[in-house]
Amino acid sequence: MMQRRIGNVRWGIAGLLGTGILINYFDRINISVATKPFEQEFHVSSGVMGIVISAYLWSYVLLQVPVGVLLDRFGVKWLVRIGTFFWAVASYMTAIVSGLGLVFLSRLILGAAEAPIFPGAAKATGYWFPTKERGLATSAFDAAAKFSNVIGVPLVAVAVTLWGWRAGFYVTGTLSLLYCALFWIGYRDPSKSKRLAPEERTYIVEGGSQQEGQEAGNPLANLGFLLRQPKVWGLTLGFMAYGYSFYLFLSWIPGYLQTALHMTVLASGFYTIIPWVVATITDIVIGGWLVDALIKRGNNPTRVRKTLFTIGLLLGIAVVGAAFTTNA
């Protein structure tokens, strides 16, 4: 009953952010799906292909801290609007250009353009959700990164099979452009939203939402403070390991299946989705709903998160078996 009285505009925002992450990852996976035909057209080795695939991460990583400062200064709305437009530009550029160097440049542009989306979604979630709902809200857009492979890989694989590898970039570029328009129309901070009822606004604020507006303090001083915190280094090391594993699967599963196990592009696309289906479900059910439910019952939040996180790490050891597999 309480949910009906206060409204659900905030969950619409969660859906909007999740859709952005979904399409954002379509742009990242398209070149991975097209590995074999791309290598054949440009006559490049797997080593060179690895550089092309990872190029967007170079600009993406370098811009994370500057983007965080810009988000604190200018807010979510404009930075993500600009970024989403250039997702489309980068994808269309990759589809059109004829030289390997220009493909590499388009990947660098893609990384720069995509840098705001994850920190922007996290910041928007802080604005729009009370503390007790933030786990589920965060898991919604985080799960979208996994779910993008469930629908994006087969989608791009079909396009590549029917019309060639460049078609996959036209598809993702068009989807990015459509999302740019959707975000432009649909996102406002809570204080500027005309759709947000006073009851829901009060519920969000009283529940511990983060305050809107420019962050106080000097950005360099704030960064220096964070770098002196052991927790920050712990999270950094953890995300380094997570990022390596995540992008290893994201970037190389389709190409590995095509090259080592001799699958077609289409078949590799459908085999690729299997681990991502599981990841999507566990992200929402365990990383979101279960965490929030256990905390609401009075369990220590830190203990809940550490326990579930440790279980996930132990289950991840199972991937070692893939190194000894010789067939699909």
Image: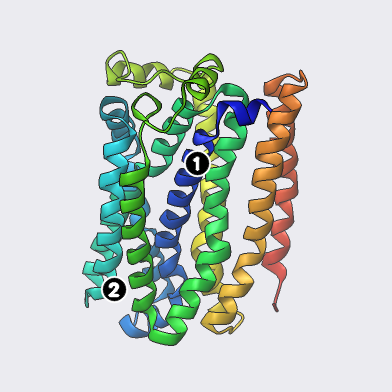
For label 1, the residue is: 12
Label 2, label 1: how far apart the Cα atoms are: 33 Å
| Vertical relation: 209 (above or below) 135 | above
Image quadrant assignment for residue 194: top left
For label 2, the residue is: 95
Return the x and y of residue 123 as percentages of the image width and height: 42, 31
Return the x and y of residue 127 as percentages of the image width and height: 44, 26
Image quadrant assignment for residue 301: top right
Q: Colour scheme of this structure image?
A: rainbow
Q: Nearer the viewer, residue 92 or 132?
A: 132
| Vertical relation: 231 (above or below) 62 | above
Residue 211 as seen in the image, left or right of residue 278:
left
Q: Give the structural element (helix, strand or loop) at label 2.
A: helix
Q: Give the structural element (helix, strand or loop) at label 1.
A: helix
Residue visible at 27% across and 68% down in the picture: 92
Disc 2 crowd, CA 10 A, few/some/many (<14, 14-19, 20+):
some
Residue 85 as seen in the image, left or right of residue 310:
left
Q: Quadrant of the C terminus?
A: bottom right
Q: Is residue 111 visible?
A: no
Return the x and y of residue 296 as percentages of the image width and height: 72, 22
Which amino acid, by three-letter code, is at mark 2?
A: Ala
Mark 2 and mark 1 in contact? Answer it, CB < 8 Å: no
Q: Quadrant of the N terminus?
A: top right
Residue 278 as seen in the image, left or right of residue 168:
right
Q: Nearer the viewer, residue 166 or 188?
A: 188
Disc nearer the start of the sequence (2/1) = 1
Residue visible at 36% across and 54% down in the picture: 179
Residue visible at 73% across and 63% down in the picture: 321
Q: How many marks?
A: 2
